[in-house]
Amino acid sequence: MNLFRRSPRNDGERKRLRAQPASNGNRRRTSATPQAPGAAAGDDPPRTAKRKAVRAIARLALAVAATLLVLWGCVAAYGKATTAEYFSVTEIQIGGNVRLAEPEVIAAAAIERGVNIFRVDAEAIARRLEQHPWVLDATATRKLPRGLEIGIVERKVEAIVLFDVPYLVDDAGAVFKRWVPGDPTPPPTISGLDREQLRTDAEAVQIAINDAIALARRYRAQGLDRVAPIAEVHAEVDGGFSITAGADPFYVRFGKGPYRQKLARLSDLLRRLRADGERPAVIHFDNEIRPDRVTVKLKKRPPGEGENDVEVTRKP
């Protein structure tokens, strides 16, 4: 009888022996609860989960504390910067001003030298500047550490419009301020409008102003301003226009537009009158029945030079 059990001769026999159930006496005892991965033998799983939760909370608290610390540092740094004398505004650069002097721009912007650069509201400065009647557009930019840059676009005066008192009109046709001594007085003066019209029908008044400016521009483009500078454009009650022009003033009633052809005819007429030694007093281009007719009333000649106050009807 062999006291030793013979070992399996090959791998197949080994696998077969492993598959055989162990005897009751030699059965291996195993724990009823599987061991948690990574946990040491004998650890309680609920305690392990609790430890993980505590660690997660600790990490979160640390992150919040670090964030609060950074924010506190930023607030402290901002507070220091907004009170530091190093950041006081000492340099103000202004560009685009022609009519307005630098002290006027600074006063309109309502800024003071020495104010902290971080307390300067650049957008508010631009808005305050644009409330000035001469300023069409404005910008303001902070230039660290102590500078402020201001740029403005001033209005360009195109004409004066007479209501009850004269007002300035810019090149866009906007009435932007009441004329006062010291303001420019560019030609032409636009008349024939009143303040009551502006109150009851502002749109119609604006159209009339724009049309008057357009007529004056066409007059200059035709070269007529070199012959007889335009002084006044009058808005007639029928919607047409008349002008007063010349160093030796004469009156031209155009009636309603279009005006390009009428201005060309006026240029030719003035040239012929100068050649004849005549001086116009009143010229009418408003004959709606016979638009090809021009009526001219001539000024008196000096004594001994011929007839006075003659009225001539000419064809173009």
Image (cartoon, helix red, strand yellow):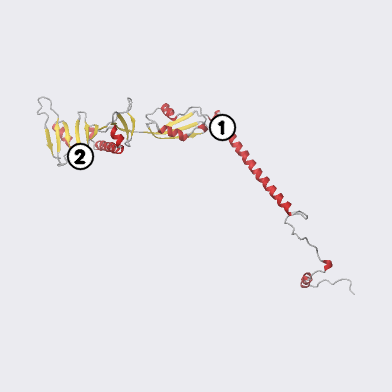
Q: Locate the C terminus and report the quarter of the image it occupies.
A: top left
State which tag comes first along the sequence, 1 or 2. Answer: 1
* Corner quadrant of residue 40: bottom right
Tell me which amino acid carries mark 2: Lys
* Corner quadrant of residue 127: top left
Q: Locate the N terminus and report the quarter of the image it occupies.
A: bottom right
Which residue corresponds to the image point at 61% horizontal and 37% vertical from the top-left?
A: 72
Tell me which amino acid carries mark 1: Ala
Q: Position of residue 310 (x, y in %)?
A: 11, 31
- Callouts 1 and 2 close, C-beta under 8 Å: no
* Corner quadrant of residue 191: top left
Q: 191 left or right of 276?
A: right
Residue carrying label 2 = 262
How would you rate the neighbour count of disc 2 (Cα within 10 Å): few for under 14, some for 14-19, many for 20 or more? some
Q: Residue furthest bottom?
A: 1
Which residue corresponds to the image point at 59% horizontal and 34% vertical from the top-left?
A: 77
Vertical placement of residue 307 versus 35, above or below? above
Q: Position of residue 78 (x, y in %)?
A: 57, 34
Q: Position of residue 284 (x, y in %)?
A: 17, 36
How would you rate the neighbour count of disc 1 (Cα within 10 Å): few for under 14, some for 14-19, many for 20 or more? some
Q: Secondary structure at mark 1?
A: helix
Q: 189 left or right of 84?
A: left
Q: Secondary structure at mark 2?
A: helix
Cα–Cα gap, marks 1 and 2: 69 Å
Query: In this view of the protein, which residue sits in the foreground, 245 or 210?
Result: 210
Which residue corresponds to the image point at 47% horizontal and 34% vertical from the top-left?
A: 122
Q: 247 left or right of 135?
A: left
Residue carrying label 1 = 81
Q: 208 left or right of 301?
A: right
